[in-house]
Image (cartoon, helix red, strand yellow):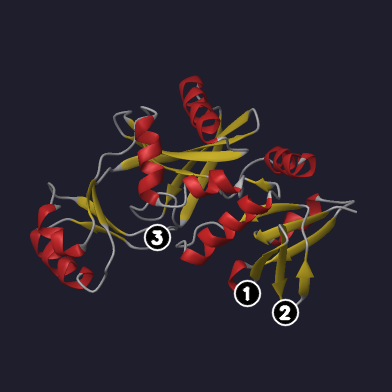
Amino acid sequence: MKTILIINGEKYCKDYFAGFNVVQKKVQTSEFIVKDAELYVIDADGVCKPDIIFWRLGAVNPKAKHRNILELIEYSGIPCVNSASTLLMGYERLSMLNRLKRLGLPVIDFNVATNVTQLKNLEMQFPFVVKVGNHHGGYGKSMVSTKEQWEELKDLLFIHQDYVTTEKFINYKYDIRYLAINDKVWAMRRKGKYWKANSLTQEYQISEPEKGWIEKVKQLQEDIKADIVAIDVLETENGEEVILEYNDIPGLSGFPEDAKLELSSIVKSK
């Protein structure tokens, strides 16, 4: 019986793999070993030698250990969904944005400095958004509306030793997620509780994906060789649309059951 190792992920994941030996472990409490070119994963529950890995560690600030693990998976040749090489491409927010820009996709413009000592050079027309480092899920982000707020935030950010980006604040009408799995694409319109898109979602609705955006997400999917990928698009009141980011470990909450079945079929086919 083949062993599917699920890394982190939702509790329901196991329900989609009848007929397989399914093991679920967390990166935070596991160690990865490559010995004689074979991959083993160890935690308090024992040792797992996987035939395939289903990587569902998302919405966290990636650490050096996570990158090391992905490199070991790549080295061992164990199939992974998404592949370890694909996940490594999107590992850093800057590399993710660079990939979108290189493809000519309408990615949000930003200023960036490698250290907070250069914050004085990143000021934009108010309001604007400040993002520190590689955090996800709404963390490490703040909106600045006045000079006073900017001065206070600069003092607070001074304790960080990480890169900082600033972006024009977009008063969005909807945050639209285009989700591509295999050759299928879904779209979901979302609205958050506050100004942060894709955070504290208050309402969502599945909608018909627009042809132009289907082409864009498929272009990205092909370029990074992803089994699954999503792009998050901000739509303004006047109809302008810009890509905020892409996500190679997107959550499936709110999407049709077909999306979960499609993704599980990819894992089983590997």
Tell which tag, 3 or 1, sits nearer the viewer: 1
Mark 1 secondary-structure assignment = helix
Residue marked by disc 2: 44
Furthest residue toward bottom:
44
Q: Which residue is disc 1 drawn over?
A: 29
What percent of the width, then of the height, locates residue 262? 72, 38
Can the viewer see residue 242?
A: no
Q: Tell me the residue that label 3 is attached to.
A: 135
Q: Could you say which quadrant of the image residue 50 lies in?
A: bottom right
Please, what is the three-letter code of the amino acid marked with disc 2?
Ala
With 10 as the anchor, is 145 left or right in this view? Answer: left
Residue sitting nearer the eye, 215 or 28: 28
Pointer 1 with pointer 2, Cβ within 8 A:
yes
What amino acid type should be assigned to the residue bearing mark 3? His
Image coordinates of residue 18 in percent, x first then y, are 87, 51
Q: CA distance from mark 3 to mark 1?
A: 21 Å
Q: Is residue 90 visible?
A: yes
* For discs 2 and 3, the disc positioned in front in the rendered view: 2
Label 3 CA crowd tier, 10 Å (few <14, some 14–19, many 20+): some
